[in-house]
Image (tube, coloured by chain):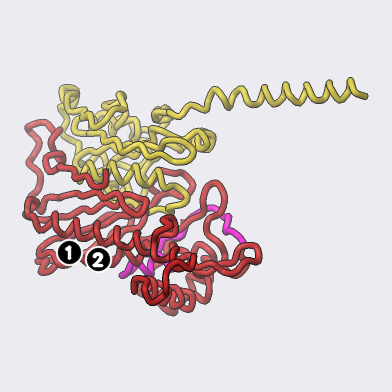
Chain colours: A red, B yellow
Amino acid sequence: MSTLEIPLRASRHGQQPAQQPPPPPGPSRRVFVHDVMGTAVSIHVRTTDPDDPVLDAASEHVHSHLRRVDRTLSTWRADSDLLRLQHGELDADAAHPWVAEVTELCLEAEDRTDGLFRAWRSRDGGRPTFDPTGLVKGWAVSAAAAHLEEVPGIAFSVGAGGDVVVGTGRGWDGPAPQWRIGIEDPRVRGRIADVVTLCRGAVATSGAAARGAHIVDPRTGAGVNRPGSATVVGPDLLWADVWATAAFVDPARAGRLLEARDPAYRLVLL
Amino acid sequence: MRRITMWAASTVTMLVLLFSYHTSTSAGTTTSAVAAANDGVVAAGGSGSSGSSGSSGSGSSGSSSSDSSTSGSSGSDSSGSSGSAGASSSSGSTTVTGDAVSTRYGDVQVQITVADGKVTAVDVTQVPWRDHKDQEINSRAVPILNEEAVSAQSADIDMVSGATFTSEGYIQSLQSALDQAGL
């Protein structure tokens, strides 16, 4: 099961008694779900023509883009370019150009966050290993969602394991519709603690594992174990994601840096 | 000396057994939103959908809900107004159960209640055994949309953002319920 598509146009008011007023006119919604990069990627499209095959094609483009990223940059698949490169099984020249692009972006992210984000870490005195996972998902989903921007007259949102991108396709008439993004309560899993509304942009959230830290403070090498989460809302998921990680490591410092360097991004601490 | 050691060891064993007893009985994987009774917003959805199965709409109970105040009441804030909210929203509320998502610690499953095109409640219907204790300790564990969001009539959400590591399973299941609801 890699892809399932859920037909649901009838579900909105289907259960209401007959005397209820009809649903307000407006674009209907189409939903696609792809199982890729170790998570489920949901695509919601608002459109006046939900049967347009262009939607299926665009959704498939998003999916194949993410599959390619996974094949190239996964830290789980031994056959990814990244791991083959690290294991000396692949020449740097032969690797997919995405490896170099992501490496550059990781350096830029480290620079931009004053080292609060860092993709290189050394374990127990060993030589540093490069793990760009913290940046790759945001970068990949942001780029994949661009395929939806090519579709005329739609609005879309893409959710990928807690990171969200929303936007519109070419030639959307009038004001872009709003999407409501619930931010999960980091203390009560499954509960929604806050809601962010936006028409175009991205939402990313970072937090510690309930059972042991997964986010490492690059300055000390120690896991960040405090409760709570950091959410960043802004134009691009790549940077929202990077800043969310930085803000979870050091909320006060990242908040100041964000204000000074990336004022288009907003920080929500829970 | 040996006897004292034996005595100490057996005491410790007994204590361990005593303490583990409660845990073992409460370690079931399913809590099926029992705590819903504490909270009106959740009870609203629960009343129509106690079956906890898939997207079983409660539309059949329309007989008891001649009042057409569905739209406004779902937005009334907090649990104080639980009774009325429960009665009215059951007229048009539907529950949608998200995918059961496997984690290392067991399955996670989230269910949403949708009334009048809005998400009015999010319930965790399956909790991994490791999380079970947390959920019990926190009496508000069965989720309620925050009061600001509810009073602003903004209880409905399209997508969910959360920290992957903290709660992958929960976000994934909740998102799959939202996908199915397709509001």
State which quadrant residue A244 falls in.
bottom left
On the image, the x and y values in percent for residue B109 come to: 37, 36
Question: Does the magenta-highlighted stretch encompass residue B3?
Answer: no
**Label 1 sits on residue:** A176
* Amino acid under disc 2: Arg
Of residues B3 and A36, which is closer to you in this image? A36
Q: Is residue A205 visible?
A: no
CA neighbours of label 2 inside 10 A, class few (<14), some (14 to 19), many (20+): some
Q: Is residue A180 visible?
A: yes
Whether residues under marks 2 and 1 lie with C-beta atoms below 8 angstroms apart, the answer is yes
On the image, the x and y values in percent for residue B36 come to: 39, 30
Residue B101 is labelled as none
Q: Residue furthest right?
A: B1
On the image, the x and y values in percent for residue B78 come to: 37, 41
**Label 2 sits on residue:** A200
Side of A189 where A67 appears, left or right: left
Marks 2/1: CA–CA distance: 8 Å
Side of B156 where A239 appears, left or right: right
Q: Chain of mark 2?
A: A
Q: Residue furthest front?
A: A89
Number of labels in the image equals: 2
Looking at the image, which residue is at 15% across and 33% down?
A15
Mark 2 or 1, nearer chain start: 1
